[in-house]
Amino acid sequence: MTATTTRTAGADDLPDGAALPVADAATTRRAARRLIRLDGRAFALMLALNALAAGAGLVGPWLLGRIVDTVRGGGGVRTVDRLALVILVCALAQLLLARYARYVGHRFGERTVARVREQYVDRALALPAAAVERAGTGDLTARGTTDVTSVARTLRDAAPEVFIAAAQALFLLGAVVALDPLLGLCGLGLLSGLPAVRWYLRRAHTAYLAEGAATSALAELLAATAAGARTVEALGLHERRTAAGERAVERCRRTRTRTLFLRSVLLPAVEVSYVIPVVGVLLVGGALHGRDGISLGVVVSAALYLRQLSEPMATILLWIEQVQSSGAAFARVEGLGRTPAATKAVPHRSAAPALPADDRIDVTAVHYAYDNGAVGRGPDGAPTPDRDVLHGVDLTIRPGERIALVGPSGAGKSTLGRLLAGIDAPRSGSVTVGRVPIAELDPEVLRRQVVLVTQEHHVFLGTVRDNLRIAAPDADDTALRAALAAVGAEWAKELPAGLDTELGAGGHRPDGTQSQQLALARVVLADPHTLILDEATALLDPRTARHTERALAAVLKGRTVIAIAHRLHTAHDADRVAVMEGGRLTELGTHDDLVATDGAYAALWRSWHG
């Protein structure tokens, strides 16, 4: 029912893409090990099949060497045919084992990436609106699309291929050493490419993190520009937004050029390392064979083994870029779990959630500052606290009471509303419902206790029924129509397919008034005991707004309603009026009492009527 805002202020300053945390290497490794343990049997089967496939592949070159020695020794055709048949059987076995290993690996990858996606969605939905607003939707979107897709591709495609290639490479090197230790030393020629690999690995992770951050920044800029297109047009900000977009694109180009440069150094160096071992075996093996120190068949087998190394090494090299890219992407995806809200929002199933004793809300000595009170650095380098926007607010809201929060713009009304809804937690003091801190309530419990409705809203793709059942999945059509009627949404009766009418592109496009009435109908269906209305009818025309407020008042009779409003007729109808000025609660009482007192509220009332 609540909505997040699109950042427009200061939008020409490119975000750094790191407003949400990025997991460090240790955290990323622990997360990867946890995912493997969750499907450990499939992972072990994949390793076993890869090892068997690699072992079957070793038989062919060894038997080919035996065939060479048999022919040179005058052996018969029957022996050669028998050895050739064994080579064919082993090649077929390798094909089948490798194919089944890929099948098991792909299934493991799909199940694992499903867990990654589900965990990401859970963590993203658990983030409070404040965290999303500070980070920007671009970063969150980029992590949930580009980064998760990169991780999925690695788990589904790269991981099985790399495991098979690595097993083949290790078995081939081991076979060369087993044939002849001296020739095995020639296999160490592969190590000539290691300095380039180490050079690449030291730089790749940071470079891919920078590329992901630049992608997030570009996505955030595009999203903000698209959402505020009319504002950009009205204020003539085309050139500034274009310049900001060019800077974001240039940043993306620089980061991607950097990763391309790293690959351009790595690939040629490793390609050369493929040739060195084969040349070494042929030279050393030829010299030893000339002195009768080794058979020709062993030289042929060793050369074939090392020649076969080029295929698995090429596979590893082909995917190493994807693995590094997805490693950085996985760090960004896992970073979402390091936000305090994500850790708090996935409670232990065994822990019993705190339940409010009643519906009374108490605000006690509340102080609050945005950005956690640290917005800069002092001369000594220490963080300097931001000026509080709420200063020692005390307020008790009784069950079933209708209270209006009024005051000039910037007085702290909306901030107090966010604290009452549990979106933010106070810097000091407490906000409790039934003596339980609101910000510590389990999300499911919180939604049954308090709902915040702002003037911002969202219509989801789908039918009218789908949009309403977000608040009450089990509601029948009668309840849905009653909720629409309660908020004055008479237009819903005229839709061509009724509740089955599709909303959005290709269907009915609701205007601002209709979208807000849909949001209010969801509130009616949610049936909370406390409703916070933060200018919830601001987008409606005065007559419709008044009608909707009266309809809501009838539906929500007996429930606690906290209305944050500039239209003071709301305050006139409330049981009590709380006046906010400069982040402080300066007046509290009934409308008549405050008008009679002739204080700040009386001045607002006269100004509004004037």
Image (cartoon, helix red, strand yellow):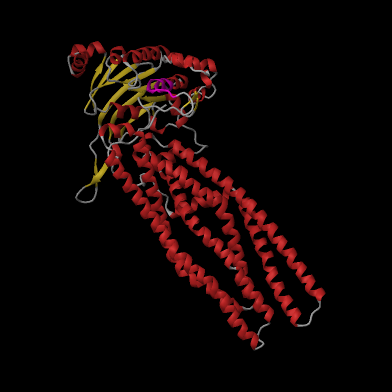
Q: Quadrant of residue 517?
A: top left
Q: How many marks?
A: 0
Residue sitting at 27 percent across and 31 percent down? 234
- Residue 63 visible (yes or no): yes
- Residue 135 visible (yes or no): no
Pick the quarter of the image with the N terminus. top left
Would residue 371 be counted in the magenta stretch? no
Horizontally, residue 316 falls left or right of residue 460, namely right
Residue 33 in picture, x, y percent from top left: 53, 52
Q: Is residue 190 above or below residue 207?
A: below
Q: Main secondary structure of the magenta part?
A: helix
User: Which residue is at the front of the view, 535 or 514?
Assistant: 514
Q: Is residue 531 above or below residue 79?
A: above
Residue 87 in picture, x, y percent from top left: 73, 67
Horizontally, residue 118 falls left or right of residue 24, namely right
Residue sitting at 57 percent across and 52 percent down? 157
Residue 294 in picture, x, y percent from top left: 66, 83
Would residue 518 be counted in the magenta stretch? yes
User: Which residue is at the front of the view, 413 or 541?
Assistant: 541
Pick the quarter of the image with the C terminus. top left
Horizontally, residue 357 falls left or right of residue 86, namely left
Q: Quadrant of residue 187?
A: bottom right
Range of the magenta residues?
A: 509-519
Residue 120 in picture, x, y percent from top left: 48, 41
Q: Is residue 566 above or below residue 14?
A: above
